[in-house]
Amino acid sequence: MKYKRIFLIVCDSLGIGYDTESIEYNDFGANTIKHIIEAKNGIKMPNLEKLGYGNLIELDYISKTNNKNCFYGILHESSIGKDTLTGHHEMMGIKTLKPFKTFTDTGFPSELIELLENKTGHKIIGNKKASGTEIIKELGMESIKDNKMIVYTSSDSVLQIAAHEKYFGLEELYRVCHIAREICMDPKYKVARIIARPFIGDSPNTFTRTPNRHDYALSPNGKTVLDSLKDNGYKVISIGKIKDIFNGCGITDAIKTISNDDGMNKNLELIDKEFTGLVFTNLVDFDSLYGHRRDVFGYHKAIEEFDIKLGELINKLHDNDLLMITADHGNDPTWHGTDHTREYVPLLIYNKNLEEGKNLGIRDSFSDIGATIADNFNCNNPGIGKSFIKLLK
């Protein structure tokens, strides 16, 4: 075992430029980080620069580095798709060859809606592709008045249910989402995720979504590196929505968060704890609050705020801690529509005792991350991926 603890942080949707398959997804030209930085004519991210971010992309606004404590590279997604489950599952060794079912163009079939109404006891409104913030403005008052569920989808394989946290009830929302997950195990409706979307407020202008979102995801379609770590007695600590993404598979401890900042603070707290294993974090605000809402300046600010917390984390890491930073897909806020973009993602690696930083180039799969983690802990890698642990000298 080379490193006692590995901290893996996924900056949800912070892609680094369209990849070789992007044209198939109508994303040729998308570049999340580049277009955010150009929109503000610069950015303050000195800690990301120290880790080698500027070596991965040609931009006048960010600097290259020769930091000997850092390795850096770019990851190419080998799976079909550009969504959360596909990206995260691939990191841990699962390659998705068949895209998850979507209902973007038509909404959900009437027989599914009727079944969901009958089993939950609530009428459904919506049933279309929509922005989550816009549909609660449109239908929130009707939902409150008649105790109805707002059902909607996106370009991803999701069935989302929005309801008022106070009037509908949070536990009731979770209950109906459990029922929806059971129904949607039928191959005809088998979406990747059911998502509970609670909101609060008393008028369309005051409605806002709360941090009590909960995802009911399909389990990975095979064993992952997380399972291997857990089976070998190592800690696998989920921060944020990681537990939901893997449906709890391979997770030993789960910590909920309410924001990116909270997620980073949870990492800082764990550094002071005694354990051996993996801390796996998803920082979802980049995607949910800024990417999907096409909020370029909000996204820009979130990156700068993350960079400050990253500096604190780097300073606290122990000699035998390894830090990895990556993303799961893109979500260029300057791009058309409001959905994810198919992009390469960055890979930044840090340990204070590394002696010769270098560029790892473009790796063939996100799963090289999981393979490296398995290799470090002398565990079986049940999936795909090529370890780069021996390169970290």
Image (cartoon, helix red, strand yellow):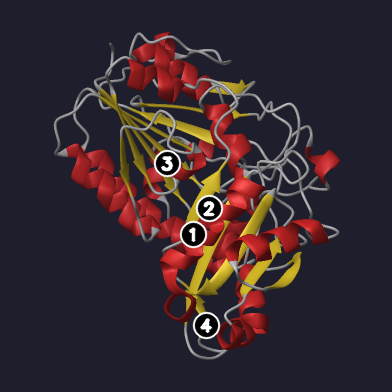
* Circles 2, 1 touching at the beta carbon (< 8 Å): yes
Classify residue 344 by image quadrant. Answer: top right
Specify whether residue 352 is in view: yes
Which residue is label 1 attached to?
175
Could you tell me how far apart the alpha carbons at marks 4 and 2 are, in whole angstroms?
A: 24 Å
* Residue type (three-letter) at the residue carrying disc 2: His
Q: Reading the chain from its start, which is encountered first: label 3 or label 2?
A: 2
Q: Quadrant of the N terminus?
A: top left
Q: Residue at x 78, y 47 (%)?
A: 27
Q: What residue did someone put label 2 on?
A: 178
On the rendered image, what quadrant is the C terminus found in? top left
- Count neighbours of disc 3 (C-alpha within 10 A) and say few if under 14, some if 14 to 19, many if 20 or more: many
Q: Amino acid at mark 1?
A: Arg
**What is the crowding at mark 4: few (fewer than 14 residues within 10 Å), some, or many (at least 20)?**
some
Q: Which badge, 4 or 2, comes first in the chain's sequence?
A: 2
State the CA–CA distance, disc 2 to disc 1: 5 Å
Q: Residue at the spot x=26%, y=49% of the render?
A: 266
Q: Which residue is mark 3?
A: 243
